[in-house]
Amino acid sequence: MRPHYTPKLKKRTALLRDLKEVFRRHRSQPIGRVINLINPKLRGWVNYFSAGHSGRCFSYIRDWVEKKVRRHLARARQRKGFGWEQWSKSWLYDTLKLFNDYRVKHG
């Protein structure tokens, strides 16, 4: 048993910094490879912090990662923006297999 707590801002920033480095290092790589690299990091971080009051933090991370993936896809096609109309959320999570199990465990 451990107390329910929210992830510290320092830990969230460290995760985002790590993910940002993966996106930066693999800028010219296909999106499938990038997703295969970030999914284990996301899964481990979310599983560690899932016992607590982490919903707000998880939604922030999910939105941030989704924007980074969209930006990566747009740049690969030499486009500006995030491609909100071009790629749906379901396509990102179902077809590309982007991590989407941001659930808080109670108990």
Image: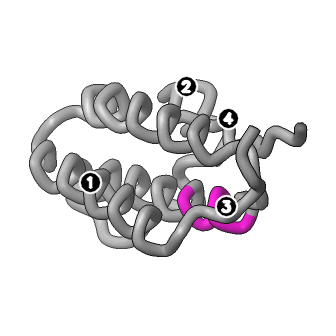
As drawn, 34 above or below 21? above
Look at the numbered disc 1 and give the secondary structure of its residue.
helix
How far across and down, in percent of the image, does residue 107 sit?
Answer: 89, 38
Q: Are marks 1 and 2 in contact (CB under 8 Å)?
A: no
Q: Amino acid at mark 4?
A: Asp
Question: Which residues lie in the magenta part?
Answer: 56-61
Between disc 3 and disc 4, whose residue precedes? 3
Horizontal and vertical percent position of residue 96: 48, 28
Residue type at numbered disc 2: Thr
Whether tag 3 and tag 4 are in contact, CB under 8 A, the answer is no
Q: Amino acid at mark 3?
A: Ser
Q: Nearer the viewer, mark 1 or mark 2?
A: 1
Q: CA distance from mark 4 to mark 2?
A: 15 Å
Q: Position of residue 26 (x, y in %)?
A: 14, 43
Which residue does the numbered mark 1 point to in the structure image? 18
Pick whichever of labels 2 and 3 is earlier in the sequence: 3
The residue under the point 34% across, 49% down is 73
What residue is disc 4 on?
101
Residue appearing at x 67%, y 35% in the figure? 101
Q: CA distance from mark 3 to mark 1?
A: 18 Å
Residue position marked by numbered label 3 in the rendering = 59
Q: Nearer the viewer, mark 4 or mark 2?
A: 4
The reply to whether dot 4 and dot 1 touch (C-beta < 8 Å) is no
Q: Secondary structure at mark 2?
A: helix
